[in-house]
Image (cartoon, rainbow, N blue to C red):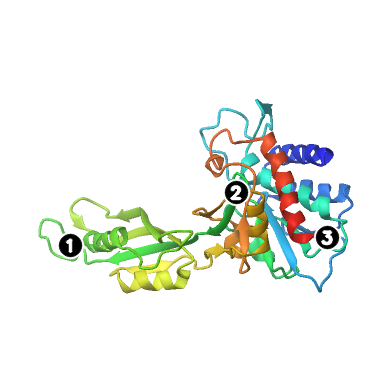
Amino acid sequence: MEELKTNAIILLKKLIKTPSFSSEEQRTALVISQWFSEHDIKFQLVKNNVWAVNKYYDISKPTLLLNSHHDTVKPNKGYTNDPWDAFEREGKLFGLGSNDAGGCLVSLMATFTHFYRRKNLKYNLLIVASAEEENSGEHGLRGILNVLPAFEVAIVGEPTKMQMAVAEKGLLVLDGKSIGVPGHAAHGLGLNSIYQAMEDVSWIKNHQFKKKSRLLGAVKMTVTQIHAGTQHNVIPAVTNFVVDVRVTDAYTNQEVLEIIQKNTICDIQARSIRHNSSSIPMEHPIVKAGLKLGLTTYGSATLSDQACLSCPSVKIGPGDTLRSHAADEYIFIEEVEEGIEMYIKLLNDVIL
């Protein structure tokens, strides 16, 4: 176990030192592939996604997916150190992607390696180190679902302080367009597209969806961008605005979109309806095993690769979501070590 932990930290440092922006993860895919090769684990590389199944995979058994991502956002301007230095200080390992989601990924890889050669498991294990999670790219987990073995349940590694996110909000990004009639501002003629858009913005701000989720609360809508006008004395013909909608498991994305379109004046279109809310039943063996270990449950407002999945899934991993995308990102070495221990204890209860 101690050797596994040490090797996982070494792997995390290698990943941090290897830039891997979304859609540019070729080099970290090779680093991950090297881990599997060194541990004599057969793997597949599809685009920049690396996946493998346990040695004694049995098609007659259900399969449990272990997933986390190896792409990162670009470092923000607030960094005071080298984002790719991977240095340790006061028990912390610093570097871009250390917390989101390198610590989770190496912990899951170590866990998979621990169980890889075990016989007579109740579940097959499938691990996917996925690409393009940060930009919801078409060549990430969603893009390879059709080539993966079928799976019935998933553990998605994201920084949750090793607590269980048993539900996750979905996402709708909406583009609103208000069409008016241009005219001279001095005459007040025409139809002001800004005023028309304001009516919809006001409705979006004040509307309360009737159904609330037990774990995720209410659907939340926020206008985040607006643009109109070309000069001071012309009534604008077009106003464009963007709405960020966080959807709960009380509605489908399509249902929320239809409610909004029914109650607004402007043309409202969704960029995509594929980022659905996700959850796992509280009576599922994984949740029960986590509760037995003293883990808490909650509903997550942030999006992950869970949005790609149609099966029950739980989000859990070492690190803290508040450090994600922050300057001078870090994860505690102890968090990764405890993450490996907790993942193994969790699976001991479920698959042995």
User: Is the residue marked by circle 3 packed among few (<14), some (14-19), or many (20+) residues within 10 Å?
Assistant: many
Q: Kindly identify which residue carries mark 2.
A: 163
Marks 3 & 1, CB-CB < 8 Å contact = no
Residue 245 on image: x %, y %: 42, 60
Q: CA distance from mark 3 to mark 2?
A: 26 Å
310 or 195: which is nearer to us?
310
The vertical placement of 255 against 121, above or below, is below
User: Is the residue marked by circle 2 packed among few (<14), some (14-19), or many (20+) residues within 10 Å?
Assistant: some
Residue 285 on image: x %, y %: 68, 62
| Quadrant hosting residue 139 | bottom right
| Res. 183 mark | 1
Amino acid of disc 3: Asn
Direction front: furthest residue: 292
Q: Nearer the viewer, mark 3 or mark 1?
A: 3
Q: Nearer the viewer, mark 3 or mark 2?
A: 2
| Res. 54 mark | 3
Local secondary structure at mark 3: loop
Amino acid of disc 2: Gln
Residue 24 on image: x %, y %: 66, 50
Apparent side of residue 326 relative to residue 95 in the rendered image (left or right): left
